[in-house]
Amino acid sequence: MTSTLFTGISELRTVSDLGTLSDAALVVEDGRIAWVGKAADAPAADSVEDLGERAVLPGWVDSHSHMIFDGDRSAEFEARMSGGDYAAGGIAVTMEATRSASAEKLEELLLERIAAAHAGGTTSLETKTGYGLDVESETQAAQIASKHIGDVTFLGAHLVPPGADAEEYTELVVGPMLESVRPHVQWIDVFCERGAFTEEQSRRVLEAGKAAGLGVRVHGNQLGEGPGVQLAVDLGAASVDHVNFLSDEDVAVLAGSDTVATVLPACDLSTRMPLAPARRLLDAGAHVAIASNLNPGTSYTSSMNYCVTTAVLQQHLSLDEAIAAATVGGARALRRQDVGNGLDAQGRPAKGSLVVGAAADLHVLDTANAIDLAYRPGMPLTWRTWVGGQLVYSA
Ligand code: NIG
């Protein structure tokens, strides 16, 4: 077991009760944080990594992405930017391209996307199936994802494939498809929205997943007010994602629950939807996460820096709130947050905060002040990224 002392930290945002420390240091041992404090008090270690007076945050925890796909929908995007609307039907275009791609190609694309996420300071990812929409392709997507990502979500209920009957397809999802993907996934999700799955179909899908031992997540209230939020809370979902259109009752229900409201600012901008009411949710006392929603239809970016910038500049979060939502908020949405001693509820190293015992997932900015994420929007601020103590990106 070797230890490394990280020093030269102008600002250490622990995203914990320790708050933000100036002139800080931390020690990493065996992939986990072993010590955090002022540089002047730091213990000796086997090696030293001088970060040159840069700001350090926990790596971003991106709790919502769709990374397994092939194909291009830039023409659909361009048409939308010329005044068209977003509709769920575009998912079928990606389904065709994904079904046609080889497993090798899909894996290669996934690895490129993971590398790009690391280059943006992301250290933990969730990703979903949902562009296969038949037993074979959904299973292949889940298998590929699970080789590289710890939190994989079964989203067979993303769209009823063209030509299929909604009821028959829902039965396929809760039966043979769920059984086939089950060994490769931890979560189940459903697109509960007009043009996708009804409340009743969504409940059936989520209950089947729960009965199979999966955690529950929901795509809800993206295109209009609807039952998604209340269904998610009712079923004890870890998160309900999008949440653009919320009634006062939806907000109150979320505030009284453990279900995280995950906002997806890059998606809102790319679909020209009203930005999700993150400020209103936080003021009401709800748990909020920020995620990228990387996908080819509504959010073709994994840049969490961009999402955090948007949350500050346009959703009126303070920098502290936005960083917390994109780190410990995402960790909570994946049930990986610190519940004491740096561990999560299952005794694994926690994600999203830099406390003793937690995963040594570090995002080092090429600046002394993290406020530059919003003050200098769009600048290349990610300097280095470590996952579990391993350097995965260096500018
Ligand atoms: O999260 N909302 C549903 N699923 C994706 C969009 C997928 C697509 O259009 O390809 C989303 O925005």
Image (spheres, rainbow, N blue to C red):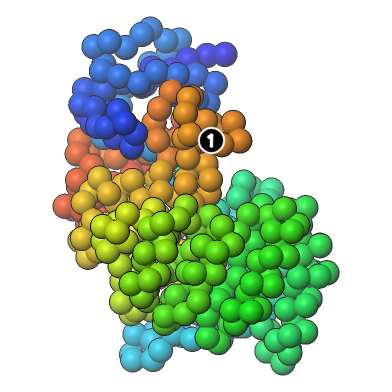
- Residue 136: image x %, image y %? 80, 69
Rendering quarter of residue 48:
top left
Beta carbon of the mark 1 residue lies under 8 A of ligand 1: no
Nearer to the camera, 58 or 330? 330
Residue at coordinates 60% horizontally, 50% vertically from top-left? 151
Q: Which residue carries the number 1 mark?
A: 344
State whether residue 225 is above or below residue 16: below
Above or below for 368 versus 238: above
- Compared with 33, 210 (above or below) is below
Q: Secondary structure at mark 1?
A: loop
Name the residue located 77 percent from the left edge and 84 percent from the top edge: 168
Q: Is residue 306 visible?
A: no
Q: Position of residue 348 (x, y in %)?
A: 58, 32
- Left or right of 394 on screen, residue 130: right
In the displayed structure, 118 sits above or below 145; it is: above
What residue do we see at 55% from left, 58% from top? 237
Q: Nearer the viewer, residue 170 or 96?
A: 170
Name the residue at the top extreme.
44
| Depth check, front residue: 340 or 18 | 340
